[in-house]
Image: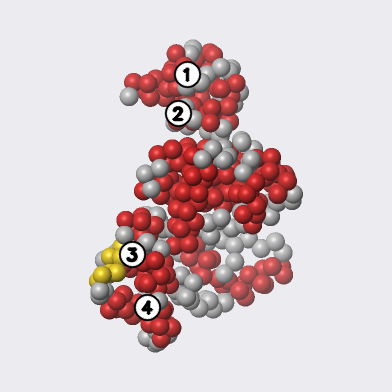
C-alpha cells in the first residue's frame, strides 16, 4: 500500500469541529513488521504524484474539453497548458500539440465531434459518451455492438441472451478481464450466438462471472467456482452494472427501444444480483435477493401480494423474522399506496 494512501486515510481521522485530534492506527503482526511499518509509513517520504495525462487518455480528455465548451483549437491548447501534466513538465507540451492536428479529425470520423472550419462542436453522441465517463473506445464498442446485436435479432439470425449483452459490456476497456477455466465451453452453453462468442473470446471470463452473479450465486460461491478474489468479483459486478446503464443510454440515443429496455433490465439484474422473476420484490426497501427469493419461494410475486399477507405469514419466510416481517408489511403497504 502506498504511503500517500495511508496518510490520506489517517488524515480523515477525527471529526472537524467536534474532535480535538484524530487517531490513526496501524497494527503490526510482529516485531519485524513493526520495524517495517515504522520505516515505511511513519518515517518514509511521500511518493511523487504523477499526472495521469498521457497519449493513451488524450483523446478522451480532448473530447471532454470540447464537451465542456472549447470550440477552437487554441481553447483546447489553453486548457492543456493549465493541467498538472504541463506544470510537471514545465509547459513542455510538444507531444500534445503534435496530436492536436490528428485527434479532432479522428473524433469527427467517429461521430464524436463536428468540424466547421476553425469551429469545433461536440455531437449528441460525443456529449453523451463524455458525460457517461466512457472512453471513446468503449462508447464505440457499445454503440456498434448494440447495432450488430439488434440487427442479428431483427434478421432472426439468433436470439440475443443476457449473456450476449454481458459479453458486449465485458469487451469495454473499463472492465478488467478475468480468466475462467473452460470459458469457451461454458459460454457456448449460455449463448446460441457462436460468432459473437468467438469474437469476444478475450472477455468471456468477465461475462461468465457476471452471468453467474445475476443467476444468484453468492460472492463466496463465485470465488469457489471461478477462483477469483472477492475484490475482483466486486469490481466485475459493479463496473458491468454501470456499463449496462451506459449501454441503455446509448441504445436510447440510437432510438432502439428494445435494446434500451433489455439493457435497463440487465442493469437492474446486475444491481440486485437476481433473476428476472424477483424484480418486483427487490423494489421493496430493505429487501435484497435473499429475502426476495424467500418471498418468491413462499408464493409472493409482487409488493401487492406482500401487502395483503398477514404478518404471521411473512414471519415464516426464509430469512425473515418478526421485526422484519412487520417492516416488509409496512413497506409493501406504503409502496402500494403511492
Between 319 and 243, the one lying in front of the other is: 243
Seen in the picture, residue 254 relative to 277 is either above or below; the reply is below
- The residue that appears at 43% across and 50% down in the rendered structure is 246
Residue 284's spot in the image, x, y percent? Answer: 45, 28
SS state under label 3: strand
Q: For the C terminus, which image quadrant?
A: top left
Seen in the picture, residue 118 relative to 157 is either above or below; the reply is below
- Binning the other alpha carbons within 10 Å of mark 1 as few (below 14), some (14 to 19) or many (20 upward) gives many
Residue 139's spot in the image, x, y percent? Answer: 45, 57
SS state under label 4: loop
Give residue 100's mark. Answer: 4
Q: Are marks 1 and 2 in contact (CB under 8 Å)?
A: yes
Give residue 113's mark. Answer: 3
Q: Are marks 3 and 2 in contact (CB under 8 Å)?
A: no
Marks 2 and 4, how far apart in space? 51 Å
Residue 311's spot in the image, x, y percent? Answer: 49, 15
Q: Which residue is mark 2?
A: 284
- Identify the mark nearer the N-term, 1 or 2: 2
- Is residue 171 visible to us here? yes
Give residue 306's mark. Answer: 1
- Identify the mark nearer the N-term, 2 or 4: 4
Marks 4 and 3, how far apart in space? 14 Å
- Identify the mark nearer the N-term, 3 or 2: 3
Amino acid at each position: 500500500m502506498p504511503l500517500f494512501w495511508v496518510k490520506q486515510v489517517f488524515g480523515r481521522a477525527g471529526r472537524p469541529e467536534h474532535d480535538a485530534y484524530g487517531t490513526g492506527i496501524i497494527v503490526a503482526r510482529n516485531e519485524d513488521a513493526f520495524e517495517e511499518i515504522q520505516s515505511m509509513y511513519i518515517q518514509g517520504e511521500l511518493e511523487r504524484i504523477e499526472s495521469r495525462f498521457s497519449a493513451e487518455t488524450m483523446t478522451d480528455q480532448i473530447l471532454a474539453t470540447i464537451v465542456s465548451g472549447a470550440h477552437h483549437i487554441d481553447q483546447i491548447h489553453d486548457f492543456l497548458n493549465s493541467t498538472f501534466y504541463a506544470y510537471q513538465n514545465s509547459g513542455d507540451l510538444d507531444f500534445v500539440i503534435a496530436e492536436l492536428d490528428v485527434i479532432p479529425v479522428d473524433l469527427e470520423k467517429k461521430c464524436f465531434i463536428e468540424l466547421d472550419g476553425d469551429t469545433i462542436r461536440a455531437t449528441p453522441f460525443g456529449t453523451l459518451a463524455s458525460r457517461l465517463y466512457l472512453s471513446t473506445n468503449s462508447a464505440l464498442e457499445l454503440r456498434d455492438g448494440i447495432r450488430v446485436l439488434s440487427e442479428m435479432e431483427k434478421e432472426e439470425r439468433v436470439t440475443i441472451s443476457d449473456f450476449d449483452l454481458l459479453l458486449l459490456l465485458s469487451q469495454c476497456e473499463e472492465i478488467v478481464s478475468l480468466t475462467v477455466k473452460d470459458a469457451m465451453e461454458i459460454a457456448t452453453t449460455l449463448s446460441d450466438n457462436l460468432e459473437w462468442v468467438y469474437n469476444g473470446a478475450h472477455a468471456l471470463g468477465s461475462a461468465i462471472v457476471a452471468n453467474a452473479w445475476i443467476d444468484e450465486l453468492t460472492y463466496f460461491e463465485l470465488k469457489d467456482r471461478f477462483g477469483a478474489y472477492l475484490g475482483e468479483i466486486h469490481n466485475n459486478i459493479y463496473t458491468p452494472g454501470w456499463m449496462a446503464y451506459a449501454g441503455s443510454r446509448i441504445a436510447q440515443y440510437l432510438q432502439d427501444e428494445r435494446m434500451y429496455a433489455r439493457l435497463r433490465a440487465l442493469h437492474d439484474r446486475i444491481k440486485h444480483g437476481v433473476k428476472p422473476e424477483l424484480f418486483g420484490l427487490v423494489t421493496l426497501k430493505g429487501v435484497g435477493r435473499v429475502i426476495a427469493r424467500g418471498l418468491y419461494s413462499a408464493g409472493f410475486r409482487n409488493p401487492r401480494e406482500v401487502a395483503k399477507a398477514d404478518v404471521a405469514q411473512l414471519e415464516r419466510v426464509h430469512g425473515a423474522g418478526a421485526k422484519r416481517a412487520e417492516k416488509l408489511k409496512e413497506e409493501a403497504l406504503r409502496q402500494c399506496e403511492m
